Amino acid sequence: MGSKIPMAGGIAERRIRPLWDAIDSRQYKNALKLATSLLTKHPDSPYILSLKALVLERMGKPDEALPLCLNAKDANPVDDLTLSTLQIVFQRLDRLDLATSCYEYACGKIPNNPDLMMGLFNCYVREYSYVKQQQL
């Protein structure tokens, strides 16, 4: 019987946990170092890109955070962790339209996923798109 390793965005959770701990304790310089080192090991991970963008945004560098989010968005992520992290950053950057388009793509790829549908519904709520909320 094999043991399952918990994964976060396709990366072992034990590698991600120190980064989240640094973000939660507002040690953004340390979190930026951890995110950068993780990106060297996983350069094509949209989850790590979105986490680094979150750190940069919290450090007051939105002009550096937006390109990272756009790179992560271009990878067309469909996992809820990446999408929710992107949604947080896009909301703080006042780009709700980009978060909505990410969720719309993911819901198109994986229809009837309740987590993704809830995320898309919440994006519509934030945009005050009442008609789209009812259609969902």
Image: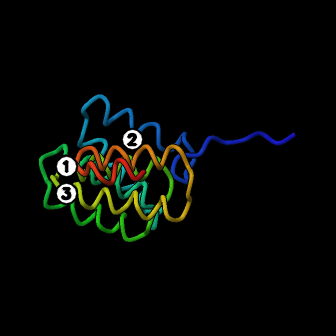
Q: Which tag is nearer the camera, tag 2 or tag 1?
A: 1
Tell which of 94 and 117 is nearer to you. 117
In the rendered image, residue 40, in percent from the top left (x then y), is placed at: 42, 62
In the rendered image, residue 91, in percent from the top left (x then y), is placed at: 22, 48
Tell which of 114 and 7 is nearer to you. 114
Marked residue nearer the N-terminal end (2 or 3): 2
Q: Which residue is mark 3?
A: 95
Q: Which residue is mark 2?
A: 19
In the rendered image, residue 16, in percent from the top left (x then y), is placed at: 47, 43
Residue type at mark 2 is Leu
Residue type at mark 1 is Glu
Q: Is residue 34 visible?
A: no
Mark 2 → mark 1, Cα distance in angstroms: 15 Å
Taking the spot 19% from the left edge, 57% from the top edge, the residue there is 95
Q: Which residue is mark 1?
A: 57
Residue 73 horizontal side relative to residue 8, left or right: left
